[in-house]
Structures are given as C-alpha cells and as structure tokens.
Amino acid sequence: MNESSYLSGFADGEGCFCVTFNKSKRHRFGWDIRPSFSVSQNRDRAEVLEIFKERFKCGTIRPDRSDRTLKYEVRSISELVEKVIPHFEKYPLISGKNRDFKIFTDICKKLLKKQHLTVEGFNKIVHEALALNPSARKKFPRAKIKI
C-alpha cells in the first residue's frame, strides 16, 4: 500500500468532512459558512498528522480540547478545493463516508465560485450541509432561512 492510499484509509476511519454555520453580522445572510477537513489522533501516534500536513502542504495541527487528541485541520476553501479534494478524488474513500465527501466537495466548489452570495445558492448549500451533518438541524435556525 502506498502512502496516499494509507492516508485515504486513515481518513475513512478517523476523518471528518464538516460544514458549520456561525452567526455573523458581516456576512450577507447573517451566517458564515465554514467547511473543514480534519483527522484526529492521540499524541503518541501523531506522526500520521504530520504526514497529512506534509502531503497536502497546508492546514494546521492543534490540540483538540474536546477529547485530548491532536487534530490536523484544513479550513481554507481554496486549499480544500486545490489540495485536499483532489487527493480523495484520486484515492477514494471506500466507506459510506465517500457520500459525505461528495456532498462536501460540491459545497466547497460552490463556495469557491461564490454561489453562496445569492439566496438560491445559499439555500442549496444549507440544504446540502444539513444532509451532510444531520445533527446541525438542532443548531441551525431553519425558520430564518428558507430552504
């Protein structure tokens, strides 16, 4: 197995493709949309996080206070589209997480094309993100945004 396939397998088990929404007065519809890719690992096995960072040439490694692990994370939309997504397109995930990856990819590409700046585009992204992260329904006030 080569290193690229290993990283995809590791991300298949320990990775997360996530899109969060944070209230923001600066953003057009009152919400900042933040996609991220992350993988976590215990400190004593953090070498794999360094490999992700070296391979993708972007992202950060930081402590994750929620579970005392280290987390490698990429949040830049351009780096996600130009560096992270092409890796997983070339070395695909094999679990059901591949479905999440495809939704995540579509959202990131829409954000890069600035489609979130129209009501229709924003609502499509919200709809897709809710399919990606069903638990977000509790946190995201759907009454304020028509989907």
Image (cartoon, helix red, strand yellow):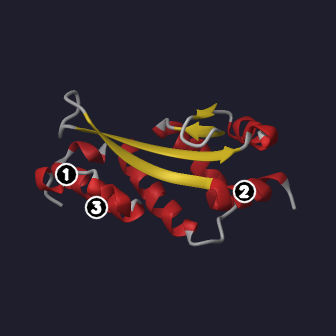
Label 1, label 2: how far apart the Cα atoms are: 34 Å
**Residue at the (17%, 40%) spot, across then down:** 29
Considering only order in the chain, which callout, 3 or 1, is on the residue closer to the N terminus?
Answer: 3
- C-alpha span from label 3 to label 2: 28 Å
Which residue has dot 3 on it? 127
Circles 1 and 2 in contact, beta carbons < 8 Å:
no
Label 3: which secondary element: helix
In contact (CB < 8 Å): disc 1 and disc 3: no
Report the Cα–Cα distance between label 1 and label 3: 12 Å
Q: Amino acid at mark 3?
A: His
Q: Quadrant of residue 57?
A: top right
User: In the rendered view of the protein, which quadrant contains the N terminus?
Assistant: bottom right
Residue assigned mark 2:
10
61 or 5: nearer the viewer: 61
Say whether disc 3 or disc 2 marks the residue closer to the N-terminus: 2
Q: Please identify the quadrant where the C terminus is shown.
A: bottom left
Amino acid under label 1?
A: Pro
Asked where in the image residue 49 lies, by quadrant, the reply is top right
Q: Secondary structure at mark 1?
A: loop
Residue bearing mark 1? 141
Residue 131 in the image: above or below residue 17 = below
Q: Classify mark 2: helix, strand or loop.
A: helix
Residue 18, horizontal then vertical, whole percent: 46, 51
Vertical placement of residue 123 versus 69, above or below: below
